[in-house]
Amino acid sequence: MSSALTDLFPHPIVQAPMAGGVSVPRLAAAVSEAGGLGFLAAGYKTADGMYQEIKQLRGLTGRPFGVNLFMPQPEYADPAAVEVYAHQLAGEATWYETELGDPDSGRDDGYDAKLAVLLDNPVPVASFHFGVPSSEALESLRRAGTFTLVTATTPEEALAVQYAGADAVIAQGVEAGGHQGTHRDLPEQDGSGLGLLSLVAQIRETVTLPIVAAGGIMRGSQIAAVLAAGASAAQLGTAFLAAHESGAHDVHKQALTNPLYVRTELTRAFSGRPARGLVNRFLREHGPYAPAAYPEVHHLTAPLRKAAAKAGDAQGMALWSGQGHRLARELPAGQLVEILAAELDAARTALSGKGDLR
């Protein structure tokens, strides 16, 4: 196993890059300062917006950090299906007194411009979601001194990541909150994702790359489990969503442990791509009818989500969350890293036969 990644941070704890304003510089800095690897999410930002956040983060910490990019998406959405869904959402627009967004607002998320920024101003780590960068892009980042990771949700995707020349693979289990990082969006495969431990084991036997395990991890004992299964580190998103430094809306943070929200589901309701969130009214009413159309549906629902958040209405927000949301702890991010590291040490001691296994 390569130590090039884990040598960057003392604890095998990676804060997941959560787009939409959650993974702000102060959160990433707090995690990195505590010995984990903090991450910025460039998704849905402009290239300059990403650059400004990198500058801000560098002013907060001198420790390594990462930046995550969304890969451009192929154009396969059915415009008629998007139009039908827009008609279905008309009542939501009336309720929230806003207009629906333009579904044709762009599909590449400014990828080329963001990649250029990362090549001109290299960061320690870069990760990619929704596909695999070209071998040329990965090699350029390597020459710039950037360690690269790419998300995979199947062993086959992990093999594609290795062939492309990435330095490590993020194994994302179906338990993960937010968007599944599938390389191709195939509606017929909805709900067929692999659980994290099974996925890590299969990827471990498929590729030689270091593995970062992601999906539903909320405690140090779970980190110990994925390390024992063959991962080099664990990536946690929902666990840091409730952190004091997180940019998540207070309503979103409170919903994680609110008994009103008893489960999560993978849904296309908010973005047109499978993403796991707490089941609320919007998800129940629109999830069954949402088309496979990302980012068209994301653009379409953006004003609705913004209006719901402004009104403090959790029933209309995209409450992205992993399956372990009930275990969320509202703590400073640095303290959370320290607690997770202590729990990991205790679990390792117990597994080695030197501690109480009860």
Image (tube, rainbow, N blue to C red):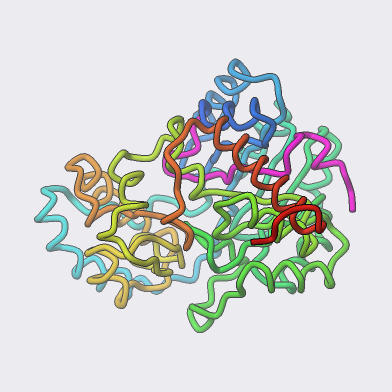
Q: Does the magenta stretch include residue 192?
A: no
Can you say whether 159 is above or below 307 in the image?
below
- Please indicate whether residue 326 sits to the left or right of residue 204 in the image: left
Observer able to see residue 133: no
Residue 203: give x, y in percent of width and height.
77, 69
Q: Which region shows up in magenta?
A: 1-24
Between residue 233 and residue 69, name the one nearer to us: 233
Can you say whether 77 is above or below 299 in the image?
below
Name the residue rendered at 15%, 48% in the picture. Answer: 98
Residue lying farthest bottom? 188
Residue 72: give x, y in percent of width and height.
57, 55
Q: In which quarter of the image is the C terminus?
A: bottom right
- Please indicate whether residue 144 sits to the left or right of residue 107 in the image: right
Observer able to see residue 70: yes
Can you say whether 258 is above or below 250 in the image?
below
Residue lying farthest top? 59
Please identify the quarter of the rendering in which residue 221 is found. bottom right
Between residue 18 and residue 340, name the one nearer to us: 340
**How many numbered discs sit on the rendered protein?**
0
Between residue 338 and residue 128, name the one nearer to us: 338
Between residue 24 and residue 146, name the one nearer to us: 24
Residue 295: give x, y in percent of width and height.
43, 58
Residue 345: give x, y in percent of width and height.
73, 45
* Magenta stretch, main secondary structure class: loop
Q: Does the magenta stretch include residue 12?
A: yes
Name the residue rendered at 69%, 41% in the picture. Answer: 126
Name the residue rendered at 31%, 71% in the picture. Answer: 287
